[in-house]
Image (cartoon, grey):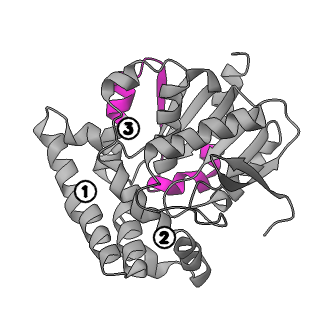
Amino acid sequence: MPNNLKTVEINGRQLHYVEQGEGQTPVILIHGSLDDYRCWQFQIDSFSKKYCAISYSRRFAYPNRVIGNVVTDNTIEENAEDLAELIRKLDIAPAHLVGASYGAFIALYCVSKNPDLAKTMVLNEPPILPFLARSPLKEDVELFKRYRTNVLSPAEDAFKRGDFKRAAQTFINRVMGIENFFEQISEQDKQYLMDNVKSLEGELESAIPSSFTIEDAKQITIPTLIVKAELSPKSFLRIADILSDNMPNTEQIVIPNVSHDNVKFTNMFSSKVMQFFERYNHVQ
């Protein structure tokens, strides 16, 4: 573990985080499924040149101690409460929030309940599946059914069999939309995913019944940058568009030649996000 790894007590848990940079304005990085604080290593150096960049491991993510039930205690709502408490404990409101995938959904939910805690948001394809499941459009409902059939059900079945490797493999391949993605990565990267696989089970269980609605999105007025990846599955791209259409203060960019969560490893992502921050640093 790095020498600069710190801990903070949040809702009865010790959450690990790294903090880098001398800037006055904080940037909080919120990771997605099968990830932890380490996933932002590529970005934290860029952000820390001007900001105080903080990357933390969410409950049940490496290297946090497992407390409670990874299925029932790992909901969007609970993760959002952790994020709000983290901001308050570190006394860094309002902060720029940057969320990837499930982490983007957490940031969005947190701000919907605590609008005073964030200055801006950057959301990389939050998987707000209820937007598709409850849509009046047949095409949206079909996208949801396809996601459930191709991603959720096979991963959930693997968890029920106790086959965590198959669960991680199925999930990451289908979410990235790249056949054999898991099989092609290094053994080190596979171990990284497996470090966080137990947390995934609860995240799969909690994504669909989330209470977050389009009406909630309409009430969020802070500046928000929605980031899409050109090669992402259609379900994620459609959710991002629904969010853009309904949140009143959003703009959208597309990162070419990458899929879903991999946008955060590109120079274009860090450049566009820094430009976005610059425009709103004066906001109190």
- The residue positioned 71% from the left and 27% from the top of the image is 93
Closer to the camera, 183 or 66?
Answer: 66
Magenta-span inclusion, residue 247? yes
Give coordinates of residue 198: x percent, y percent: 48, 69
Point out the stretch of residues depicted in magenta. 241-269
88 is higher (above) or lower (below) than 265: above
Q: Secondary structure at mark 1?
A: helix
Q: Secondary structure at mark 2?
A: helix
Quadrant housing residue 72: bottom left
**Residue 147 bears which disc, if any?**
1
Closer to the camera, 106 or 261?
Answer: 106
Tag 1: amino acid:
Tyr
Closer to the camera, 115 or 275?
Answer: 115
* Mark earlier in primary sequence (3, 1): 1
Q: Secondary structure at mark 3?
A: helix
Q: Are marks 2 and 3 in contact (CB under 8 Å)?
A: no
In the rendered picture of this protein, how many numbered marks are placed on residues? 3
50 is higher (above) or lower (below) than 236: above
Q: Residue furthest left?
A: 138
- The residue positioned 39% from the left and 25% from the top of the image is 217
- Few, some or many C-alpha atoms within 10 Å of disc 3 (few <14, some 14-19, many ≥20)? many
Give coordinates of residue 177: x percent, y percent: 35, 63
| Observer able to see residue 27 | yes
Tag 2: amino acid:
Val
Tag 3: amino acid:
Ala
Mark 2 — residue?
A: 197
Mark 3 — residue?
A: 240
